[in-house]
Image (cartoon, grey):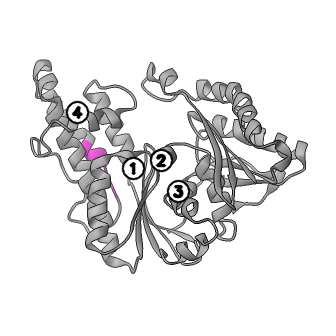
């Protein structure tokens, strides 16, 4: 039984994973309402909330599975906010020392990369390894507020970076765009909601690097273009045209994501396509990527909604799934936080 702790940013999360049957339980405390007032995450407040909520979440977990049954503790050790990571790591080490069980560090981004495979394990834990082998090599798109990357997972479950963003992440671009339009935090869901009644062709926002052969992403120019467009409009016009602005802005972001994914798929001999990260909940993005995978006759796997944001379920799963692929740090009680830990090397 693996106990996992996650505290890389503004979600305090605990999960229990049994390799024989899957995730036994997951508990999350969200801080969105706390940080909404400030329009973004305040690290000092976030770390204070982790300190306050880890205890109650662990108590709820131990009602489901007694502490005596836990044989390993997995904890996010990077990337993330240093003060927040330290809270989870301190809790994990304390419990591990108290119980005499090993503690391992999990890369938060690599956990996202493996999260689309969690339903595959839940459907058939006994034959998971054989089922996963049929889907590798795998092409994955990770899209969140802080990261945008294309990566591959080979037959040995090793991850290789194919591309990343040269500036803003896609989720960050959506959040900043929402802020420019006076929408709430986090901005991505607000943009998506308004976009449903707008026209994606109403405004011609730039499709960054669309014609280049590079797989890298760039979104800073898109944000600047939106700002210039808003400066040309009167407040009442902006309010009236928000659905069109959101639809067109979102379309530009999704075009970049799908265009580069299509290009990567054409270049590699992949056997599946995956989508993970917070922006993976965007229904238009899901639909467009599924179309790309279908045209290539590839299975399309996406992380479940509960595993797209910061969560401990994917941390526990990755600690087990990556046990022999070099993605789990085995430094035990000497484990250190790694705020800038990369997904993988190119």
Q: Position of residue 183 (x, y in %)?
A: 30, 26
**Which of the marked residues, 1 or 3, is nearer the chain's N terminus?**
3
In this view of the protein, which residue sits in the foreground, 38 or 34? 34
Query: Are the residues tagged 1 and 4 within 8 Å (C-beta)?
Result: no
Residue 194 tag number: 4
Q: Position of residue 82 (x, y in %)?
A: 64, 39
Q: Is residue 302 visible?
A: yes
Point 82% across, 49% down: residue? 69
Q: Residues within 10 Å of mark 1 (few under 14, many from 20)?
A: many
Query: Are the residues tagged 3 and 2 within 8 Å (C-beta)?
Result: yes
Query: Are the residues tagged 2 and 4 within 8 Å (C-beta)?
Result: no
Query: Are the residues tagged 2 and 1 within 8 Å (C-beta)?
Result: yes
In this view of the protein, which residue sits in the foreground, 70 or 330? 70
Measured Cα–Cα span from mark 2 to mark 4: 21 Å
Q: Quadrant of residue 261?
A: bottom left
Point 31% across, 61% down: residue? 290
Q: Which residue is mark 1?
A: 280
Q: Left or right: where does residue 223 sit relative to residue 92? A: left
Q: SS of the residue at dot 1?
A: helix
């Amino acid at each position: 039984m693996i106990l996992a702790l996650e505290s890389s940013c503004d979600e305090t999360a605990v999960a229990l994973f049994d390799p024989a049957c899957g995730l036994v339980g997951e508990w999350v405390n969200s801080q969105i309402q706390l940080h909404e007032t400030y329009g973004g995450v305040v690290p000092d407040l976030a770390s204070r909330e982790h300190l306050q909520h880890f205890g109650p979440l662990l108590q709820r977990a131990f009602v489901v599975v007694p502490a005596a049954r836990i044989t390993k503790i997995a904890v996010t050790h990077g990337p993330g906010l240093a003060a927040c990571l330290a809270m989870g790591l301190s809790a994990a080490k304390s419990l591990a020392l108290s119980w005499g069980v090993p503690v391992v560090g999990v890369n938060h981004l690599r956990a996202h990369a493996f999260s689309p495979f969690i339903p595959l394990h839940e459907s058939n834990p006994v034959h998971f390894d054989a089922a996963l082998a049929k889907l590798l090599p795998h092409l994955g798109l990770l899209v969140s507020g802080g990261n945008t990357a294309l990566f591959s997972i080979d037959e040995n479950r090793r991850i290789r970076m194919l591309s990343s963003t040269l500036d803003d992440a896609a989720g960050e671009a959506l959040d900043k765009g929402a802020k420019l339009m006076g929408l709430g935090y986090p901005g991505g869901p607000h943009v998506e909601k308004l976009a449903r009644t707008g026209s994606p062709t109403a405004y011609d926002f730039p499709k960054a690097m669309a014609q280049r052969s590079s797989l890298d992403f760039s979104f800073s120019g898109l944000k600047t273009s939106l700002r210039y467009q808003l400066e040309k409009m009167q407040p009442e016009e902006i309010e009236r045209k928000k659905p069109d602005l959101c639809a067109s802005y979102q379309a530009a972001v999704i075009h970049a994501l799908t265009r580069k994914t299509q290009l990567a798929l054409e270049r590699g001999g992949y056997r599946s396509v995956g989508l993970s990260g917070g922006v993976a909940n965007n229904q238009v993005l899901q639909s467009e990527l599924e179309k790309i995978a279908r045209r290539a006759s590839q299975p399309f796997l996406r992380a479940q909604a509960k595993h797209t944001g910061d969560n401990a379920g994917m941390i526990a799963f990755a600690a087990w799934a990556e046990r022999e692929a070099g993605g789990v740090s085995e430094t035990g009680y000497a484990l250190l936080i790694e705020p800038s830990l990369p997904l993988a090397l190119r």
